[in-house]
Image (tube, rainbow, N blue to C red):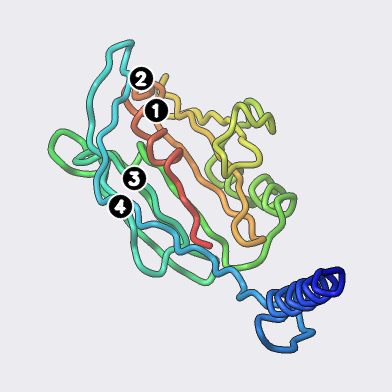
Amino acid sequence: MHKLFYLLAIALIFGTSVACTDQLSGGQANSNPPTTSPTSTPTPQPRPLTIADTISVEGEKQKITLNLYDQKGLPFTTYVPANRFIDQTVSSGEGTAVWFYALQPDSTPNKDVYVQFFFPSEVLTLEEAKEKLLESNGLFATNQWQVINRSQVQEDLYPWAKEKIIFQQKGEGDRSIVGVVFIGEYNGKAFWAVQHYPVEFGDGFEPLAGKILSNLQLRS
């Protein structure tokens, strides 16, 4: 009887050892750890061609439609209020500029009321871009824009912007042009956007311009 129990115990131990070995090795001798394939970068989802939105003009909510602006060869996409703007792109050795001019009632562009993006050809840091804008022959001096205020506070900026410079320009008679230059960075290169309009257009233009600026998305 004791001998029988002893044989059963030996068989049980031996069987358990073989089972454990098979589980660890998958039935084969393999000392190399399993490998995993690298995780692929997810493909960005395409932006809708149109979206519905609202703006507030003098305290009143207005429904608007925004159309996707996505032009091949440009480093950005954005949304533009439908039937409110016309775009123009100019490229030169200095860089690429894209204007969104507000449309007048007769559907012609108002060249004083616009949002503009400018991407310099040369690689500029943020500090170099500010120096270029504010130097004696820079954008501000050329257009006689007087700096009113500057801010780097993130709450005052769009997500892509690092600084904004508020300006004013004296026009004919009592007419004044006001606006903002936002300085941002794209793939290690500085760029800027301009919001430009006569004072009397502010209530109607600012909410529309804000949609173009807030929906800016830079290509990776």
In the picture provided, is 14 more to the left or to the right than 81?
Answer: right
Name the residue located 25 percent from the left edge and 51 percent from the top edge: 49
Numbered disc 4: secondary structure = strand
In the picture provided, is 25 more to the left or to the right than 220?
Answer: right
Between circles 3 and 2, the one closer to the viewer is 3
Q: Does 215 appear above or below 171?
A: below
Q: CA distance from mark 2 to mark 1?
A: 6 Å
Which quarter of the figure has residue 213? top left
> In the image, what residue type sits under mark 2?
Asp
Residue under label 2, please give it.
203
Tell which circle, 2 or 4, labels the residue nearer the N-terminal end. Answer: 4
> In the image, what residue type sits under mark 4?
Asp
Q: Report if the CB atoms under discs 2 and 1 are less than 8 Å apart.
A: yes
Residue under label 3, please give it.
79
Residue under label 4, please give it.
87
Numbered disc 2: secondary structure = helix
33 or 98: which is nearer to us?
33
Q: Does 186 appear above or below 199?
A: below
> In the image, what residue type sits under mark 1?
Glu
69 or 6: which is nearer to us?
6
> In the image, what residue type sits under mark 3?
Tyr
Residue under label 1, please give it.
206
Tell which circle, 3 or 2, labels the residue nearer the N-terminal end. Answer: 3
Q: CA distance from mark 4 to mark 3?
A: 12 Å
Name the residue located 86 percent from the left edge and 74 percent from the top edge: 3
Tell which circle, 3 or 1, labels the residue nearer the N-terminal end. Answer: 3
Q: CA distance from mark 4 to mark 1?
A: 17 Å
Where's the N terminus, which quadrant? bottom right
